[in-house]
Image (spheres, rainbow, N blue to C red):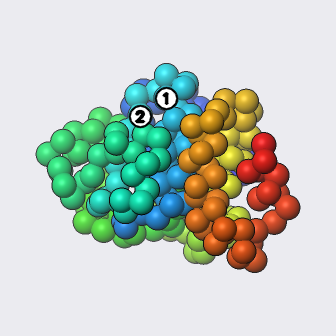
């Protein structure tokens, strides 16, 4: 992220009261790890924050801290829609195009709240007011660590946030076997 984008994010956060965080449909460890890491960080900063998943996430991720608080769009649209409509700011994590949320896309397109995209996949769409997109990263969780660093907030990373970040890095790196695993990846999980 450049200085202008960081300043824009800080301004959006100053203005936001209610924040929604969204992973992609059929979320994996990186999607859930990044959304829950950001969720816990924003909660620590006293934001009213909600994670909404387009559909159920795998049971093997249900142990993640905060996973019990995730709302499922396909399961309970009547509860989820007012939360989306009340949001002042929406983060989309680990996906680069709104169609990746499936059926929820039609409701997202009606919203007026600004979007912030954080993602490591190629060819991001232009729906977000701020886009932090970089294919050099092996996971969105690594990007969340850097995002917090850009905000000057790595000192806010506690065991809960670190657990979520570690989960996403581990799953998207194939347990540190994939080529995008770097020395920086290891420094992040060690810190």
Instruction: Identify the image quadrant of residue 20.
Output: top left
Q: Secondary structure at mark 2?
A: strand
Asked if residue 90 lies left or right of residue 84, the reply is right
The structure residue drawn at horizontal position 64% and vertical position 59%, both measured from the top left corner, is 169
The structure residue drawn at horizontal position 40% and vertical position 28%, both measured from the top left corner, is 48
User: In this orientation, does residue 110 appear?
Assistant: no
User: Could you tell me if the residues under marks 2 and 1 are in contact, i.e. CB atoms within 8 Å?
Assistant: yes
Asked if residue 110 lies left or right of residue 64, the reply is left
The structure residue drawn at horizontal position 39% and vertical position 45%, both measured from the top left corner, is 67
What's the mark number on residue 49?
2
Q: Nearer the viewer, residue 181 or 77?
A: 181
Asked if residue 50 lies left or right of residue 127, the reply is left
The structure residue drawn at horizontal position 42% and vertical position 40%, both measured from the top left corner, is 66
For the C terminus, the quadrant is: top right
What's the mark number on residue 43?
1
Check the image and name the residue furthest to the top: 46
Q: Position of residue 19 (x, y in %)?
A: 42, 36
């Amino acid at each position: 992220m450049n200085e202008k984008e960081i300043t824009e994010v800080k301004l959006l956060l100053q203005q936001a009261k209610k924040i929604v965080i969204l992973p992609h449909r059929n979320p994996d460890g990186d999607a859930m790890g990044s959304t829950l890491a950001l969720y816990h960080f924003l909660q620590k900063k006293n934001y009213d924050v909600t994670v909404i998943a387009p559909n159920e996430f795998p049971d093997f991720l249900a142990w993640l801290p905060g996973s019990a608080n995730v709302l499922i769009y396909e399961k309970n649209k009547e509860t989820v829609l007012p939360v989306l409509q009340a949001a002042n700011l929406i983060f989309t994590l680990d996906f680069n195009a709104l169609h990746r949320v499936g059926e929820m896309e039609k409701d997202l397109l009606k919203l007026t709240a600004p979007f912030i995209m954080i993602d490591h996949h190629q060819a991001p769409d232009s729906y977000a007011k701020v886009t932090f997109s970089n294919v050099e990263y092996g996971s969105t969780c690594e990007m969340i660590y850097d995002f917090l660093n850009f905000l000057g907030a790595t000192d806010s990373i506690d065991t809960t946030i670190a657990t979520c970040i570690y989960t996403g890095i581990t799953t998207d790196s194939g347990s540190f076997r994939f080529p995008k695993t770097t020395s920086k990846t290891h420094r992040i999980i060690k810190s």
